[in-house]
Amino acid sequence: MNLSRISAVILRHYFLGIHQMERFFDMFISPILMIVLWGFLTKYVQGLEASTLAAFLLGGIILWAIFEKVGTDIGVNFMFDIWDRNLIPLLATPITFLEYLTGLISISLIKILFSFVAMWIMASIFYGFQITSLGFGLALFGLNLFIFASAFGIFNISLVLRFGHQMGPLTWILPFFVQPFAAVFYPVSVLPPFFQKVSYFIPISHVFEGMREVLRSGQFSAELFWTAFILNIVYLAASISFFAYILRNILKSGRLVKVI
Amino acid sequence: MSKPILEVKNLRKNFDSFVAIDNISFSLEEGEILGFLGPNGAGKSTTIYCILGLIDPEVGEINIFGKSIKKDRSEIFKKVNYASAEFNLPWNLSLWESLLVYSRLYELSDAKIRISELLEIFEMTHLKNTPIRDLSLGLRARGNLCKALLNRPKLLLLDEPMASMDPDVVDKGINLLRQIQKEDKISILYTSHNMWEIEEVASNVIFINHGQIVASGTPLELTQKVLKLESGEPNLRDVFIHLSRAKNESK
């Protein structure tokens, strides 16, 4: 065993760590977010019936998967064109940026439909949980989750275009920043007052509140749906505007051809 | 006289204080192959990216088929293509799948026939199911050329397309390009650091350095003009060295 060679490996990863944001996330932010999430969940489950809890958790994870998978998939599919060094030849074709984005969002939608069916069948067979018990509300919850995930994906792509492919890992990291405030597994009321205010401005927190409402009382809350929907329109418009701004900027600065 | 296929007028591009392209103008006629030469960082690729609409110039106008790329880009680019050895087809897709994806981007109605035809021409039919990642550098560059000819382009922008090919493959590639170019009257803007390649394919050459056109003409004219020789043979290698060093010294 040679200590110098071992230290070379450590040094190599130290340098990688200080240059790559996701290493920092792995070390500090991820454990903190996990503690926050599971801490609030633990606080909430005390005194809750096991069957209710199981339905809330399974319903929460299935709906969360819609947001997380679509949100990350849009960015990851874009990153594939960068990793493959295929982005420039692709953009040198007649395709417009709007068509390219629409294509990325569409394939994410197709993929999540398959994933959803797989999760539905698994939850139904192994845990006796019927996500379809959410009724027509399920489609409306899905719509809001999909819109927010699309806005999220477009925002991620804009960041990569502006700051380069080293921002790529944010694509699969950012959803976990949202999770504790999205009230996926526990109601917003469990959060401290300031976090509740943050949570209000996250459209999908209203989706998860709505899901628990349906599971608890069988009632679909139109108010929660519309709140989420209006917020989503604002976020979608903001992320498209941000993308257009970044695009103008990188076409001028020549950054687009450096993203590769 | 018919309108040129490509017309670049007074193009200028700065990156902060660095002048990448300094007021260059040139045009490309139907069926012409224009060698676009210059040292690294001279502004060749930046010019090509401006033509592709991937960099916005500060000043200047780019017209293809007599139309502005700012207004009619999607329509124009159905008959334009681009290849560079710097870029790949989608890494994890097979050659056939990659070309099929691109044929959709160019809205080809006879995609399968055209792909088979090109794979045959480039002697790659046996590799059609091979993932791009498993092809050698030279084969990937040939795959790029297949993609570049997929839409039967009227204008082809080739940025060092054969940079990683061995001399035998380059020779075959050039012969193929010349043959296809003659048959289909394709106009080609061709950059390369291999002067022999340019001498073989280009009818005219423009030489740029520090973003400015410093010489232009046929390969033979350039050799005679720049090197002040009575030579009957073009020698772009010496022209290249002479012009690159002269400009650098004057700077």
Image (cartoon, coloured by chain):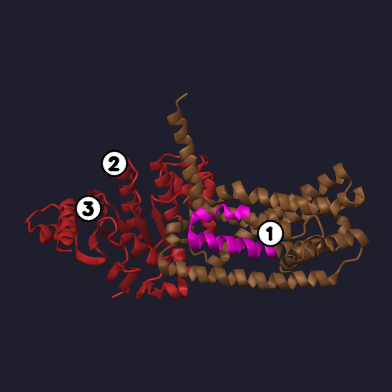
Chain colours: A brown, B red
* Chain assignment, label 2: B
Question: Between marks 2 and 3, how big is the CA–CA gap?
Answer: 14 Å
Q: Nearer the viewer, residue A36 or A53?
A: A36
- Please tell me which of labels 2 and 3 falls first in the chain: 2
Element class at badge 1:
helix
Contact between marks 1 and 2 (CB within 8 A): the answer is: no
Label 3 residue SS: helix
User: Nearest the camera: B46 or B19?
Assistant: B19
* A137 over B171 or under it: above or below: below
Foreground residue among B130 and B45: B45
In the rendered view, tell whether residue B183 sits above or below residue A125. Answer: below
Give the main secondary structure of the magenta stretch: helix
Q: Which residue is mark 2?
A: B167
Q: Is residue B212 left or right of residue A143?
A: left
Q: Which residue is mark 3?
A: B199
Place of residue A119 in the rendered image (x, y in percent of width and height, measured from the top left): 78, 48
Task: Check contact, mark 3 vs mark 1: CB within 8 A.
Answer: no
Give the label, 3 or 1, closer to the camera. 1
Q: Amino acid at mark 1?
A: Val
Element at label 2: helix
Q: Where residue B220 sits in the image (x, y, percent)?
A: 15, 57
Picture quadrant where residue A193 is located? bottom right
Question: Does the segment drawn in magenta span residue A162?
Answer: yes
Q: Are marks 2 and 3 on the same chain?
A: yes
Q: Residue at x 46, y 73 (%)?
A: B72
The magenta segment: A148-173
